Image (cartoon, rainbow, N blue to C red):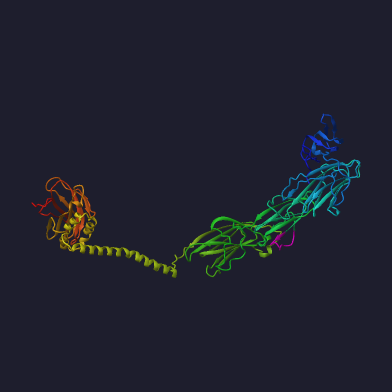
Amino acid sequence: MGKKALAVCLVAFIIPLASAGNYNAEIEVEDGIIWFDCENSNVILTNSTGFEINNSSEIYENLEAGNYFLNISEIDNCQGIIPVTAELSNTRPPPGSAINAGFKMLDHEICNLNGTSSNCEGVDTSGNLVNDPADVFGINVTSGQILVTELIASSAAIEVKFHFQNNTSEELVQNSIELNRNSSINSEHDAIIPIENDGRIIITVTSPALDTVWGLNTKLYEKDELIILKNIDSISGIGKMNFKYILPTFESMLITNSVNDLMEAQNMKYRFVYSETYSSDWLNASIGDRINSITESEYIEFEWDCNCEWHASMSQHEHYDAGWGGDAPSLRPLSSTSNNSTYPLIPMDGSLHTGELTLEMNDYRDVLRVETTGWNESIHLVDVTVEGDIYDLQVTIWDIDQNTWQEIDSLTKTYSMNDIRATLEVGRGTHFIRIQHINGSDSISEEIQPVEWKIRVSTAVIDEGEEPWFPASEEVKSAANVFYWLMGALMIVPFIVFYLQVKNDRLFAEEFASKKNRLAWLSERLDKGEDIEADLSRALRTMSSLDWEDALQTWGTPELRHLTSGIDIALWKLDKRLSSDGEIPLMLGIMPSENEWSVAAVRLEAPEGKAWTITNVEPKLLFRNDEIFLDTISAGSRVFIKLNIKGEADSIDIHLSGMMLTKPIAAKPSKTMYLDSEEE
């Protein structure tokens, strides 16, 4: 136990004192004796009036209760007692009896033991045995607690005994503190008492000397039955303590320290717990021992058991291979369907990967995985280099048949010229590399440190192989048939729509042509207020499917017609209500009878006055000013155009031009159409 430091307020006292250098403080004491013993240091004590009571290396003085000033030049060189407790009883109370007002029962704050350093201050008690056979006081305790009593100092030989009392009986505790002379500077004497039952501890202080001054510090601890260990770097405790620690698979713990308060090696023990009802036998361990994880265990239970204060530390180590989060398997997968996800995959890019053979954990062989990609029949050169403390290792590369999972070829190499290097040609797919101790299972030993290895793998394509062709499966064929039918349906739908539209247009044209002089009929509908734009637009599109003469009879007698062996041109004047803003609606029909007209255009000329301006054409054709561009008109085709013109002239001439058989050609009716229907 570490000695307490002298508190400034001196509710507590100490000896020896832990802080170095000069000590100067005001102290408050009870009636009693102050005792100090120093080496190469003076104790100066003055009362509240400034009167110097002592100035020497020793002091044994009876003080009255009150405040004093204490100065010690080198406190580390001193031990002593300051009276902080009133006069104590000199007899033990009987078991089960009530405690009278004159008997001192210490009021303790319970400190918790959780595996870390405790800052428990405890309670200081002082006394003197002048004219007293004994000083006696007590502490109430409960089962599972630990009582720690430390001797601060004693001016002479001393014996401290402990009795446990319950309601019916009293028992002498085996632990005690005994000195056959006074305590010395920096000496340590303590008693640790585990409490097994509820009751009270009676502490009795006796001495063969009649003027003995003494001081004790008591601490009362409680702990959980099984403490979860969180920090293994620094573990401390008092008496018997059990800890629980979860050690992941492929990891180990190294005991780096385990000593008691006298700095003597303190052994401990541990066991693996597999379930609430099953665990391994207890195993002993000491400094330098390594504890390896067991896959099936839930946690490791540690136990320190000594009648002392102890301190320990451990370090945790990972035994992972190639950064895979675990130890590599020791055998190849049995078949191509086996799960090989636990085999570390080594990238073949020349990067460095590390691992180890943890011989003390029965790990003398690691199997790693590499994967080559390419076409069928491709050949890859796999180059493996292993470095490190590998003098007793060998490396094997396996070329695996991807269908049968049998070994096609293999190559084994051992240490040579600072490393192990192996190169093998393999096919496309998954292959394996084995790193193994040359002595096999005979190399396993708890006394041997892990053998660390470093591996680099690179690859080069020797033969690219043949680009694969994969025959379609039945599922693919079924899906393809559905796709073909779907695409066929999607492709035929436009033709069906087109056919129906042409048929409807043909029927409309025949119905429209069933009555002659349709222009007059359209005018009558306009008189009735009906909208005829849609019917007229559709008629323009569909009448081209009728015979030319039938179409002319349907529309009625043209206002202007030009008929030759090569071209037939007809012009009708429409009802002005089919236009707006003073525009003049016309309808133009053209049919080449023998040859095709290309680059064709028609011009509406004004024989007198300003030129005409075309404002609208239906169907949509390119027009400008008084010209309409028809592009190509095939022989025998019928073209009907509705157009609106605007101008101030009173007559119209038609001029059609284009190319026929690569030669320029033109056609112009000899007559002029007058807008008032009078011909000149």
**Residue 213 in sight here:** no
Q: Is residue 469 left or right of residue 654?
A: right
Q: Is residue 581 left or right of residue 301?
A: left
Q: Is residue 232 left or right of residue 58?
A: left
Viewer-proximal residue among 412 and 490: 490
Q: Quadrant of residue 50?
A: top right
- 348, above or below 55, in the image: below
Q: Quadrant of residue 526?
A: bottom left
Residue, far left: 680
Instruction: Give the magenta-colored segment's residue range.
Output: 271-283
Where does the image place residue 3, in percent across and percent down from the top left? 79, 43
Q: Residue at x 11, y 59 (%)?
A: 564
Confirm whether the magenta stretch covers residue 277: yes
Where does the image place residue 311, in percent across and percent down from the top left? 74, 50
- 629, above or below 365, in the image: above
Which SS does the magenta portion mostly show?
loop
Where does the image place residue 506, in percent across and percent down from the top left? 23, 64
